[in-house]
Image (cartoon, coloured by chain):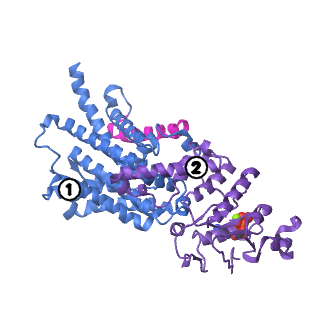
């Protein structure tokens, strides 16, 4: 059996698409394929270019960033360092700049630091900036994971269960922020089991089951689909 | 008093000379393992390449400084060559290939006599400023030179580590999926780390040759790689300061046990002493792992949080 088989999804830029489906439906595997962490036999296009043969870091540089369902905090680095790692194409990432153009590197480093602090404040973990990321709680690691992805200024974000384990107030705040970012043109593909939350922010819902797309449509329409209710939404609908 | 000083000073100078050479050697490994998480079990090979290149070029007429630069560059280049096929694969591939390489290299040093002079080794090469420094002060001069080199390497590494470049290395050590997902070319950074770490080992090799004035294939046994690992672990992985202290402790211990039979009676022949020392080192490492696993200068949090 294949984890994902014969799937086709189209995502219009500037929209929020929710990806739902039962456990083991192949949603995370789909993310791995899109972000280059796993190889498949299909074709993936992003902004008019094929990305299915690119390594993950090149896909990220194209402006598409993903988060991990199980947060991957860099445990022995501080929370702030975790965030400051994110911006792409930093001057100081090149050895000769570090050696020869110290002043410019430090300038940019300061700017990155300020921006990172802003993002940490938004996610309400700025008081933890000097803690080792390994010391964060599960929910805080989840927030750090998302904060780090936002810090690279992507044009498209793949969020794997962003609300799992996050407190309701902050969930709403993050939803609000996703809305704002969408307004400014960012595209989202969001895996989420919290149906009310995901239907509220999504323009379009894709339902996966057993490695295939079994339904897609507008949130209200999906909520009424008999087959979706049977395999996934069940009693909730 | 002055008499005692007269006997003790050269002894301390010897310890510090070895300690500074091995501190530089181990700093290279600390960049690779401590900061990038690369497992290099053949670090001694780059030590040997640096030493041999320097002295062989020099005895064939090349100015000393250029010979050293060539040795450092060649050691770095071999780091590059070994990194290319291995660093894209799982981390243990580098470990296996570097072990193999260090043994192959030693057999080349032994057997390719036209190039390396085989088991008899190389001597008679120049030492820095040996014609201007009076013989009786030469070791003192060398110590000053080596400490200066060590300080230079230390500060250069600290600057690199504290830069965004160093931040990417540390993120690779922690979990390379994260930098990949954030657009960093993990392979390229690992390669850079291996090249620089190897080049630093090459520099240490040249230093060693200058001090001991005679090198042969036996100078570069696999045990030297092990010494570098002991130093890094003792001082605290990912701490450059700790690495330097680790080197001093190890050499103080080695020299201490070398002469201990002159002070207190020990029940060993001198040839058994070497084995005995390694047993003690092993025991000390075990105790360290039990009571201060993060090393002398490592931070407890860093180790306690590893999952
Ligand atoms: N590396 C792997 N090797 C083999 N099978 C895998 C692998 N990763 C996932 N699978 C299988 O593929 C299927 C889909 O897994 P996936 O993680 O994509 O599910 P998911 O839709 O994200 O589920 P959840 O909602 O629980 O996160 C599962 O049956 C899983 O067991
Ligand atoms: Mg999943």
Residue B286 in the magenta stretch? The answer is yes
- Per the image, label 2 sits on a secondary structure element best described as helix
Residue A146 in sight from this viewpoint = yes
Query: Dot 1, how many residues are within 10 Å of its Cα: few (below 14), some (14-19), or many (20+)?
Result: many
The residue at 36%/56% (across/down) is A97
Numbered marks: total:
2
The residue at 61%/55% (across/down) is A147
Which of these two is toward me, B135 or A198? A198
Q: Which chain is purple?
A: A
Q: Do labels 2 and 1 share a chain?
A: no
Residue identified by numbered label 2? A118
The label number, if any, that marks residue B169 in the structure image: none
Where does residue A98 sit, x and y in percent of width and height? Answer: 37, 53
Q: In which quarter of the image is residue B115?
A: bottom left
The residue at 58%/49% (across/down) is A118
Where does residue B120 sit, x and y in percent of width and height? Answer: 21, 54
Residue furthest out toward the right: A235
Residue furthest out toward the left: B131
Left or right for B133, reference A136: left
Q: In which quarter of the image is residue B109?
A: bottom left
Q: Give the range drawn in magenta.
A: B268-295
Pointer 1 chain: B
Pointer 2 chain: A
* Alpha carbons under labels 2 and 1: distance apart: 51 Å
Q: Which chain is blue?
A: B
């Amino acid at each position: 059996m294949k984890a994902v088989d014969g799937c086709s999804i189209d995502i219009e830029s500037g929209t929020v698409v929710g990806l739902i489906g039962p456990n083991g439906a192949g949603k995370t595997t789909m993310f791995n394929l899109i972000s280059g962490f796993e190889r498949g036999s299909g074709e993936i296009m992003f902004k008019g270019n094929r990305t299915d043969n690119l390594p993950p870091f090149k896909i990220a540089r194209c402006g598409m960033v993903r988060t991990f369902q199980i947060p991957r905090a860099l445990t022995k680095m501080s929370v702030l360092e975790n965030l400051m790692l994110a911006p792409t194409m930093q001057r100081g990432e090149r050895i000769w700049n570090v050696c020869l153009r110290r002043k410019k590197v430090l300038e940019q480093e300061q700017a990155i630091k300020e921006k990172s602090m802003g993002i940490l404040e938004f996610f309400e973990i700025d008081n933890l900036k000097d803690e080792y990321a390994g010391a964060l709680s599960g929910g805080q690691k989840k927030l750090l994971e998302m904060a780090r992805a936002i810090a690279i200024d992507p044009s498209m974000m793949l969020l794997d269960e962003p609300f799992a384990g996050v407190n309701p107030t902050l969930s709403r705040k993050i939803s609000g922020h996703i809305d704002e970012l969408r307004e400014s043109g960012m595209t989202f593909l969001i895996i989420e089991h919290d149906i009310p939350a995901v239907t509220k922010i999504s323009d379009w819902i894709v339902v996966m089951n057993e490695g295939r797309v079994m339904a897609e449509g507008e949130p209200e329409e999906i909520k009424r689909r008999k087959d979706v209710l049977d395999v996934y939404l069940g009693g909730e609908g | 008093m002055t008499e005692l000083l007269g006997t003790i000073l050269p002894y301390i100078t010897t310890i510090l000379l070895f300690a500074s050479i091995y501190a530089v050697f181990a700093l290279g490994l600390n960049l690779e393992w401590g900061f990038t998480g690369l497992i290099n079990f053949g670090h001694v090979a780059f030590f040997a390449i640096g030493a041999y290149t320097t002295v062989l070029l020099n005895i064939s007429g090349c100015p000393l400084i250029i010979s050293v630069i060539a040795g450092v560059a060649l050691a770095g280049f071999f780091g590059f060559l070994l990194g290319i096929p291995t660093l894209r694969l799982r981390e243990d591939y580098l470990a296996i290939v570097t072990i193999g390489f260090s043994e192959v290299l030693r057999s080349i040093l032994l057997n390719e006599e036209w190039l390396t002079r085989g088991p008899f080794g190389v001597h008679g090469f120049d030492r820095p400023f040996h014609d201007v420094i009076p013989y009786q002060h030469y070791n003192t001069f060398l110590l000053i030179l080596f400490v200066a080199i060590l300080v230079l390497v230390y500060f250069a590494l600290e600057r690199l580590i504290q830069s965004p470049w160093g931040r990417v290395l540390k993120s690779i050590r922690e979990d390379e999926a994260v930098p990949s997902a954030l657009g960093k070319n993990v392979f390229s950074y690992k390669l850079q780390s291996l090249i620089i770490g190897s080049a630093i080992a090459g520099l240490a090799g040249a230093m060693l040759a200058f001090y001991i004035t005679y090198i042969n294939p036996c100078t570069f046994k696999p045990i030297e790689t092990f010494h570098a690992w002991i130093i890094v672990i003792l001082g605290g992985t990912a701490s450059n300061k700790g690495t330097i202290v680790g080197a001093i402790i190890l050499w103080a211990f080695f020299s201490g046990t070398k002469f201990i039979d002159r002070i207190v009676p020990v029940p060993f022949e001198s040839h058994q002493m070497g084995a005995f020392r390694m047993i003690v080192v092993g025991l000390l490492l075990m105790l360290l792992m039990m009571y201060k696993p993060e090393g002398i200068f490592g931070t407890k949090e860093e180790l306690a949080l590893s999952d």
